[in-house]
Image (cartoon, grey):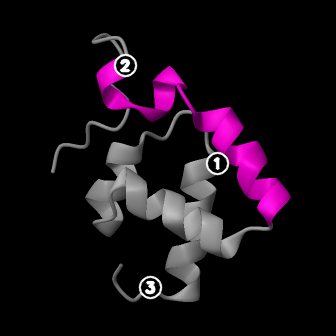
Amino acid sequence: MKDLSRAEISRIIEMAWEDRTPFDAIEFQFDLSEEDVIALMRQEMKHSSFKMWRKRVSGRKTKHRKRRKDSVKRFTAPN
């Protein structure tokens, strides 16, 4: 995993908790795969908080672009 500032780590955690922010958006902005985000969350969070987050995002359609409906166009930045 690449070196990240505390501000970047904080923003990634914030984005990971947001229901409608897909992992693709984090990868686009920070070049971190879903697995990298999971590892970062595991490292930065208390164990109980990490377990709660994993339970929350596992299988959530809005966190995985492939599971989203084609009509959902959020995070389709023009650049």
Residue 55's quadrant in the figure?
Answer: top right
Quickly name the residue at label 1. 17
Per the image, label 3 sits on a secondary structure element best described as loop
Q: Residue at x 25, y 43 (%)?
A: 77
Amino acid type of the residue tagged 2 in the rendering: Arg
| 20 vs 1: above or below | above
Amino acid type of the residue tagged 1 in the rendering: Trp
| 21 vs 64: above or below | below
Residue 2 bears which disc, if any? none
In terms of sequence position, does the residue under pointer 3 or pointer 2 come before the other? 3
Where's residue 7, x and y in %?
A: 56, 81
Amino acid type of the residue tagged 3 in the rendering: Leu
Residue 66's quadrant in the figure?
Answer: top left
Q: Residue at x 49, y 41 (%)?
A: 21
Quickly name the residue at label 2. 67
In terms of sequence position, does the residue under pointer 1 or pointer 3 come before the other? 3
Q: Which residues are magenta?
A: 47-67
Residue 4 bears which disc, if any? 3
Residue farthest along the left direction in this orientation: 79
Quadrant containing the N terminus in the rendered view: bottom left
Where's residue 67, x and y in %?
A: 37, 19
Question: Is 39 in front, or is 78?
Answer: 39
Question: Is 18 in front, or is 76?
Answer: 18
Question: Is 17 in front, or is 78?
Answer: 17
Was residue 60 drawn as part of the magenta stretch in this picture? yes
- In 3D space, how far apart are the residues under numbered discs 1 and 2 (Cα atoms)? 18 Å
Using a 10 Å C-alpha cutoff, classify the residue at mark 3 as few (fewer than 14 neighbours), some (14 to 19) or many (20 or more): few
Left or right of residue 39: residue 55: right
Where's residue 51, x and y in %?
A: 74, 49
Q: Residue at x 34, y 38 (%)?
A: 75
